[in-house]
Image: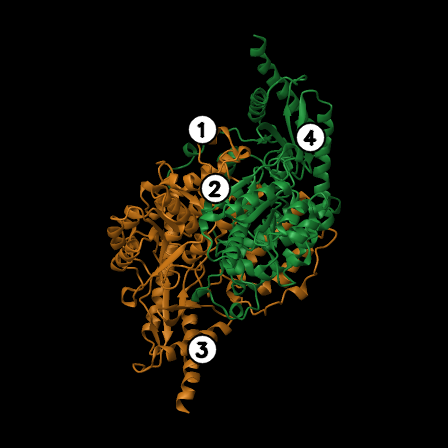
Chain colours: A orange, B green
Amino acid sequence: MDVEQFRKAGYAAIDKICDYYINLNSKRVVSNVQPGYLAPLLPSAPPEKGEDFDAIAADYDRVIMPGLTHWQHPSFFAYYPTAASFEGILGDLYANYASNPGFNWSCSPASTELEVIVMDWAAQLLGLSSAFHNSVGLGGGVLQTTASESALVATVAARERFRAANPDSAIEDLIIYVTTETHSLGLKAGRVLGLQVRTLPVRTEDQFALRGSVLQEALEEDKAAGRHPFILMATVGSTSSGAIDNLPEINAILQDHPEIWLHVDAAWAGIALCCPEYRELLHLDAINSGADSFCTNFTSTLWVRDRKSLTSALDITPPFLRTAHGDAGTVIDYRNWHLALGRRFRSLKVWFVLRGFGVQGFQKHIRQAIELNQHFNTLLADSDILELVTPPSLALTVFRVVPSKHSDVDVAALNTLNAEFHSRLTARTDLVLTQTVLNGIFCVRLAVGAQRTTETHIRSAFDAINEEARAALAVWNLPARA
Amino acid sequence: MDVEQFRKAGYAAIDKICDYYINLNSKRVVSNVQPGYLAPLLPSAPPEKGEDFDAIAADYDRVIMPGLTHWQHPSFFAYYPTAASFEGILGDLYANYASNPGFNWSCSPASTELEVIVMDWAAQLLGLSSAFHNSVGLGGGVLQTTASESALVATVAARERFRAANPDSAIEDLIIYVTTETHSLGLKAGRVLGLQVRTLPVRTEDQFALRGSVLQEALEEDKAAGRHPFILMATVGSTSSGAIDNLPEINAILQDHPEIWLHVDAAWAGIALCCPEYRELLHLDAINSGADSFCTNFTSTLWVRDRKSLTSALDITPPFLRTAHGDAGTVIDYRNWHLALGRRFRSLKVWFVLRGFGVQGFQKHIRQAIELNQHFNTLLADSDILELVTPPSLALTVFRVVPSKHSDVDVAALNTLNAEFHSRLTARTDLVLTQTVLNGIFCVRLAVGAQRTTETHIRSAFDAINEEARAALAVWNLPARA
């Protein structure tokens, strides 16, 4: 493909993206292809000779598009919002074209320096204290690939800090603390690192938040048994239900255990800190005073209080990666702040999005999603067959269907009912919601956050939910009547 | 930014990319900014209100472009080639616009199914046996984020396979085997996982390849001492010098140690397997008969012989990630094949590039880079002050400057000379080469592989190298004469 062929294909791609967003509302949300749909539509081997891009682009429409679930669709309420923006698409496009891995400062100075700056911008957007700012030079921020990698990196740094202070402790005795509501990234970090994980219980009446007393009890038990908890993965806004661990209580207890690293995973909720009115709810003060690391999925941002904790755990510098500035310590070499060597120029995306939206644009997006969720809750409040399982958290609601009089129905029967309900919802292609289980209760989640969602979509979603709830109840009642 | 603003900004970005590649040859290769250049050019906080994209794009040209080193430049000979292609840029653009994380099959079926198919295409391109093909169902291929992640994933799978078979072995006794020439990803995997690493020696006369006898000796020693080597990271084409470990000898020895996982890191050289004439040199038969995992940096591709070794090490499925097809085992859920949960739709890029170039396009690119390197070696052979440190490997040459008669000069003095030589090269902005150290010898690397490099660039590079070599010799001779 020569430059002019690329120009033509590039313009066509931009037009395709415009058409996609213009028509998004009229598309089904969920793909209805069956497993294995694609293989019969494509050759089983790559072509011998290069093909014309028009043919490739046409195949994208013909075979890929039918297999996409549209995460940007206004009626996408599953998992968590991903909110792709035009600014973000442009940021990635700009990052790709000069394509230069920024593992060292010297590889492409702009890549590192922009990241150093926009991570401080993002820290300010969220209200993180200067302890986490790159410009101060003790802590700092870095883009990881995912929240899972952030948790893994924090765990490695915590483990090495602990082992440096306690060289005689056996790896087998180290324990990662999570709760039953911590994202699977906690258990996965344990699996990857081959470390024990202790899952602390949370209670429905605490809205699934970890309480200090539970932590205290576990610590006493483990320490008495010679085990070494070395990191607590606390959550501010769990994926499952939006639970917010009680960080003030946790901080108070961890004061007596300075060897324990506090990682705050706010992958989903952290970005809401851009709105001052949510900072108390999300324990910003406690994050600023107590967290060793903080992560949110605004492009997988991770901040740490002590950058040396990362570099002393992760720095491996072979001769072919040495540079004059790196040796002199005058620059950040970000490869020593994460797992891999290679990295993309993702700070461009952060820069474009922060500038394109401004602080007010972020606040508007967050407030709009939360208001839409409140609207859903207003509709829910009038229903006699839908009930909240826990109070709504920001833009997330967890609910279930119940018979209109259900004081005598047991949890197992209700779970059967709700599995039927969710299975009916899943069969629809005009909206998508995912399920979860909270302390044994099967429930359904509505996560608002796509950029184009309006009250009309919420109303339609409620109607669809109501319809499937009634249908599930009808089927579920049948055997009882027989 | 609305759709029409995006269309305008998108077209402009495509034009900018076209201009970039049209003018690339006339740019300096290396950025000459100083550490900290960027902060004074940007505000210290994000803007309150969103900005117009024209201003952002203008700032990209004004403040970012001067800080870029141009990895796609025809005179970029440092590190390793990254060879961005127009097809690849389009692939990433298409992947971004519908932006859907493909962690489960259900998230967006096309994302998983295309990856399953193009990994088999890529396996065929490289000649990997059907044991590694997804369509066969035992092994399979997956896109990782980097070769470092591939090595980490392989190590975790190997460790869990070993521990399942040897539940009483202590983590402290496990050992990762690498060589002194293994990429830093080997040592880093050890650091991340908190495991011992043993670095096996290689010899200059073996062209820095690991030999079977060295492996055998280490195994006997470690096993006698109760230690457990559980993975060997072998290299086919080291970053430093293009060394190719002796896989036939390694396979012969590992036959008696089936508990040891053989990971073949061919991050740099693996793609050359697309040319049948290099398959013997790169030990394709031994890879096909003995490797448990194989990685090359054609978009960070990883293949494994036993997919269950990945999923049993990495599968964590919380309720909110369960799906009907996943539970039934009828689909691949790629999140269980790597470290993170989230993943991008990168198989589109692989698909676009494989189709745009075809098998013959890949072969042409590889052959051209190797021919250019041979041309460099022809020039080098005529020089009386430049010598090879090891024979050239594919498109990589490792050399150093020497006085024309140097039989009596010791290594330390020559290293001083070559550090001066490299430092002079580094001060230039019209080309870039990086250094390495091979068994104590400081040397300079020329890595060919940018898409637009021609014989003219090689000739100019040789002239620049020759000039700086003479200048370094002149300075170095001075104190000796005094």
Q: Are marks 3 and 4 on the same chain?
A: no
Measure how far apart labels 1 and 2 are at the Cα level: 33 Å
Residue indicated by mark 4: B458
Measure how far apart labels 3 and 4 are at the Cα level: 68 Å
Q: Determine the image quadrant of residue A374.
A: bottom left
The reply to whether discs 4 and 2 touch (Cβ–Cβ < 8 Å) is no
Count neighbours of disc 3 (C-alpha within 10 A) and say few if under 14, some if 14 to 19, many if 20 or more.
some
Count neighbours of disc 2 (C-alpha within 10 A) and say few if under 14, some if 14 to 19, many if 20 or more.
some
Quadrant of the frame with the C terminus of chain B: top right
Residue A420 disc label: 3
Q: Residue at x 30, y 46 (%)?
A: A288
Q: Nearer the viewer, mark 3 or mark 1?
A: 1
The residue type indicated by label 2 comes to Ile
Q: Are marks 3 and 1 on the same chain?
A: yes
Measure how far apart labels 4 and 2 are at the Cα level: 37 Å
The residue type indicated by label 3 comes to Glu
Please tell me whether mark 4 sits on a helix, a strand or a loop.
Answer: helix
Please tell me whether mark 2 sits on a helix, a strand or a loop.
Answer: helix
Residue found farthest to the front: B224
Residue indicated by mark 1: A328
Indicate the chain on which mark 4 is placed.
Answer: B
The reply to whether discs 2 and 3 touch (Cβ–Cβ < 8 Å) is no
Indicate the chain on which mark 2 is placed.
Answer: B
| Residue A297 point in image, percent of width and height | 42, 52
Residue B56 disc label: 2
Measure how far apart labels 2 and 3 are at the Cα level: 50 Å
